[in-house]
């Protein structure tokens, strides 16, 4: 993956963007959040921000992960 790039296609299940040593992910439901969090933590990324956005059926979950100092980002 390239730094400072948005990886998103119309049929993607989640939205992923990288910027410097952070990875931004937008999920559609808590099941996706749980799966993303497990995978990102497994590879040493640290969750630094979590936000629920919108309400009801349009609700999204925004998660920001920090890559540990001295490590390369691990994208799943």
Image (cartoon, helix red, strand yellow):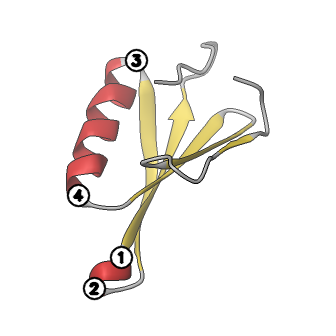
Label 3 sits on a secondary structure element that is loop
Q: Which residue is mark 3?
A: 43
Rounded to the nearest angstrom, the CA distance separating label 3 from label 2 is: 32 Å
Mark 2 surroundings within 10 Å by alpha-carbon count, few (fewer than 14), some (14 through 19), many (20 or more): few
Mark 3 or 4: in front is: 4
Distance between the alpha carbons at the discs numbered 3 and 4: 20 Å
Name the foreground residue: 63 vs 58. 58
Q: Which mark is residue 27?
A: none
Label 4 vs 2, first from the N-terminus: 4
Query: Residue 16 placed where, x, y %?
Result: 57, 44
Quote the CA–CA distance across marks 3 and 1: 27 Å
Q: Earlier in the sequence, mark 3 or mark 4?
A: 4
* Figure quadrant of the N terminus: top right
Q: Are discs 2 and 1 less than 8 Å apart at CB?
A: yes
Q: Nearer the viewer, mark 3 or mark 1?
A: 1
CA distance for labels 2 and 1: 6 Å
Q: Which residue is mark 2?
A: 56
Q: Position of residue 56 (x, y in %)?
A: 27, 85
Residue at screen point 53% across, 19% down: 74
Q: Are marks 3 and 1 in contact (CB under 8 Å)?
A: no
In the figure, 70 relative to 59: above or below? Answer: above
Q: Secondary structure at mark 4?
A: helix
Residue at mark 4? 30
Q: Earlier in the sequence, mark 3 or mark 1?
A: 3
Find residue 6 and report its image quarter: top right
Could you say whether the residue bearing mark 2 is in a helix, strand or loop? Answer: helix
Category of crowding for the residue at label 4, using alpha-carbon neighbours closer than 10 angstroms: few (below 14), some (14–19), many (at least 20): few
Q: Alpha-carbon neighbours of circle 3 within 10 Å: few (<14), some, or many (≥20)? A: some
| For marks 3 and 2 on the same chain, the one whose residue lies earlier in the sequence | 3
In this rendering, the answer to whether 54 lies above or below 20 is: below
- Please name the residue that numbered disc 1 is placed on: 59
Toward which corner of the image does residue 73 lie, by quadrant?
top right
């Amino acid at each position: 993956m390239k730094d400072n790039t948005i990886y998103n296609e119309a049929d993607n299940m989640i939205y992923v963007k990288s910027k410097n040593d952070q990875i931004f992910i937008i999920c559609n439901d808590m099941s996706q959040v749980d799966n993303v969090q497990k995978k990102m933590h497994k590879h040493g990324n640290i969750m630094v921000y979590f936000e629920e956005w919108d309400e009801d059926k349009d609700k999204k979950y925004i998660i920001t992960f920090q890559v540990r100092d001295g490590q390369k980002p691990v994208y799943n």
